[in-house]
Amino acid sequence: MLQFPLWKQLLTWALVIGGLLLAVPNAYYARVEAHNDAAKAVEEAGFATTEQQAALDEWPDWMPSGIVNLGLDLRGGAHLLAEVQVEDVYKARMDGWWPQVRDALRDVRDQVGSVRRQPAQLPYELRVQIENAAGMAAAVDAVRALGSNVVTLTGVGQTDIDVTAEGNVLIVQLSEPERAAVDQRTIQQSLEIIRTRVDVAGTREPTIQRQGADRILIQVPGIGSATELKALIGTTAKLTFNPVVRRGTAEDKTPGAGNVSLPSMDEEGVWYTVEEVPVVSGEDLTNAKGDFDQNGRPAVAFQFDVRGARAFGDYTAQNIGAPFAIVLDGKVISAPVIQSHIPGGSGIITGNFTVEEANRLAVLLSAGALPASMNFLEERTIGPELGQDSIDAGRLATLIAAGAVSLLMIASYGLFGIFAVVALAINMGLIFGIMSLIGGTLTLPGIAGLVLTIGMAVDANVLIYERIRDELRAGAKNAARAIELGFERALSAIVDANVTTLITAAVLFFLGAGPIRGFAVTLAIGIITSVFTAINVTRLIVTYWYNRRKPKTLVV
Amino acid sequence: MAWRFKLAPDNTKIDFFRWQWITFGGSLFLSVLSVVAWAVMGLNYGIDFKGGTTLRTESTVAVDVGAYREALQGLPLGDISITEVFDPNFTDDQHVTMIRIAAEDETLAVTPEQITQVEEVLRAAIDPEMKFPSVETVGPKVSGELVWTSVLSLIVTSVAIMIYMWLRFEWQFGVGAVLALLHDVIITIGIFAVFQIKFDLTIVAALLTILGYSINDTVVVFDRLRENLQKYKQMPLREVMNLSVNETLARTLMTSVTTLLAVGAMLVFGGDVLRGFSLAIFIGVLFGTYSSIYVAKNIVLIIGLDRSEKAKKSGTPDEFANVDA
């Protein structure tokens, strides 16, 4: 009799059945996907349409419904790697500090004399030249008093600004913990805003995640091209309403203090000089949507919040007849003349829009402006047909690989070869089951990992069977003993071989650009399941076969 | 005894050291040659490592690379390379090329406007129905980092495997195994250099996979070697090594052939996108098997094993014998 403890038998059975059950939905991919989409939509809406109900009924609720996600390279879509320019925010912060610093220095004027702002050498610093270098100590003290404590895990007890002096120049810098906090906030906000914008565009299952210190990875399946995606998320969408000082035909090199010269968005060669401080900005918007003006041209309708509405109402009441500029990302969309007092806080922006542009602008405005601009480091577009071709090729390669390996195993080990093939089939099922369970993503290199697993999974069987042959040759007491020893003694080589491959998979995961990460995941899962199937499942089958047939001589 | 297909006959008694100057020397020679080819010819880096853009074109019109080149000549772009892609899965009127445009200077990648221009020019000159199933751009900043991460990951993996081998075996085994692995990886790189096959991030993934897989055969041999060293304490090291390799020859070949079958299927039928990846793994597994038999143990032999210490360290039976005495 071959011994295989009952609890191990039961556990093996449970794992196999459970794993395979989890894998089943992948065999009905389209149906389960429709079911899951419908389920999600119903949960959000709170009721089901007939179509959704039909999709829901396609797949029974008691069955597992997790499926393997298809990576961008298999499904088609767009991929962007963006770098958030956190320096933008530093600069804005330092500009914000200047009036406070100036006021603080004014209080100690008798000691420092007059002050002048100097160009900064780093994005996160403010340089102020003072008249009396002797009063520097007082100046530093006065400015230092402005700082407040930063609340972070690591930066306890540190202030948000560092104040130093260099000759007669006072330098105010954002402190290290404050910069870290600013970075953190900027990336977090950018992530939120990108997510809102992509969600509003209505694509399915986008991946938007932070990568490293200042990067954001955006993957959107089903979108036509990376350029399209970039148009949606690459715009800062900073909207402001500024009073117009004058209109000109060239850039105004001397706009005057507090003014800036901005080009028109549509009219070539038209420049507006506007006041730098806006009356209201996009932050005060509560809502924006695509609309049409009274002439039927596409426009964007917007609604201000209470604060914005009051500011806008007061300004329009006082400046009837004067033009004001609607500025988007440093370009003037239009500069209408204020016809009357606008009290309700709502209005429309007209410009040379197409319907599509008006809608996109509305989406951007409602989602809010990005806190900083972004650089795109990587752009990839993969067409859905290419993805489908890859899936088909991968499926063919998998089938042929499995067929060839099975033939070789059966030719080499006969009945035991068949056992190994059964274990291999279960192994494939388990890989899909686990991938579905953890919501893993199958990529094209991931398919390669699967094919590679086919070749590697039977290796453990080969080691066990060869070891059984060794034991038979060495004259084991009986067939049962040879089998037991074979499994036992092959174990150390199997474990060593697979641990090293697992190390590789781990490194690959951390090296991990998207598709390669997919490879690492399938490889790692494949290693674990293949050790399980080769050792436990094969053992189980061999035990059942042996105890039933009780062969006198063993041929492996 | 039922009929069994066998890759190696039973009970081989091959002297694997006999032609050492050819086998081990040849490996050394090939490794040096590969490094030279790598240094002299350089690798045909893809955009992952060099920055730039690749476009995949698909058209029903048969490909004339010259015509493509001519069409793109006038555009103000960096270096352009055009290769036709073949695959058994393609239909008869499916003609595919890969166009690679190098990043113009070190700071700027190819702009979307330039890509649109390329697409328009090709549609005008070759086929108005031409499709562009994939367009990928990688900026020089990322590509520079990817080179570094790749090198780092190869080093980390090698060191991690060496440490693991050292924990499980003697340190000499770790050194032997890892040098044998580097041999596999270097020769694979050499072949990619000689034939100027596109070298991108997936190839690095393949090299890492080779590191992880190729060691398997070596582990099997070393595992048996460790066992035999216990069993035959008086036998010269060289003999024990030969015995161990002979005893494990059948399984070494078998495990490699199953993997080669699978990878071979992927190489032929798995589509052109993964071809470089499959090729690298195929070459790596092939040389990996060879090095498990002819390289790894030779290095251990050269370094030498302290067998008396070995008996002390992991010889459990001896310890029990001592207890009894």
Image (tube, grey):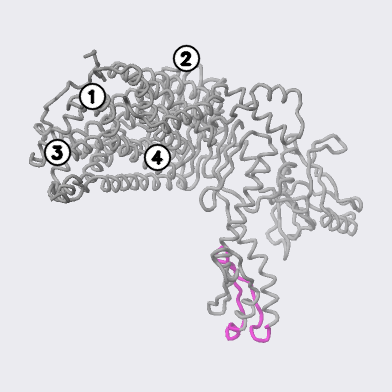
Point out residue B197 in the picture as x, y percentages from the top left corner: 35, 31
SS at mark 3 in the image: helix
Q: Amino acid at mark 1?
A: Asn
The answer for how far apart the CA atoms under marks 3 and 1 are is 22 Å
Q: Amino acid at mark 2?
A: Thr
The residue wearing badge 3 is B231
Image height of A278 relative to B257, above or below: below
Q: Amino acid at mark 4?
A: Ala
**Circle 4 crowding by C-alpha within 10 Å: few under 14, some 14–19, many from 20:** many
The answer for how far apart the CA atoms under marks 2 and 4 are is 36 Å
Point out residue A356 in the picture as x, y percentages from the top left corner: 73, 34
Rendered-image quadrant of the N terminus of chain A = top left
Quadrant of the rendered image containing residue A422: top left
Span shown in magenta: A108-137
The residue wearing badge 4 is A505
SS at mark 4 in the image: helix
The answer for how far apart the CA atoms under marks 3 and 4 are is 35 Å
Q: Which mark is residue A478?
A: 1
Which chain does tag 2 point to?
B
SS at mark 2 in the image: loop
User: Is A448 on the left or on the right of A415, as rendered?
Assistant: right
Q: Which mark is residue B91?
A: 2
Front residue of this view, candidates A484 and B309: A484
Which chain does tag 3 point to?
B
**Same-subunit check for callouts 3 and 1:** no
Q: Is residue A351 magenta?
A: no
**Same-subunit check for callouts 1 and 2:** no
Q: Nearer the viewer, mark 1 or mark 4?
A: 1
Asked if residue B67 can be seen in this view, the reply is yes
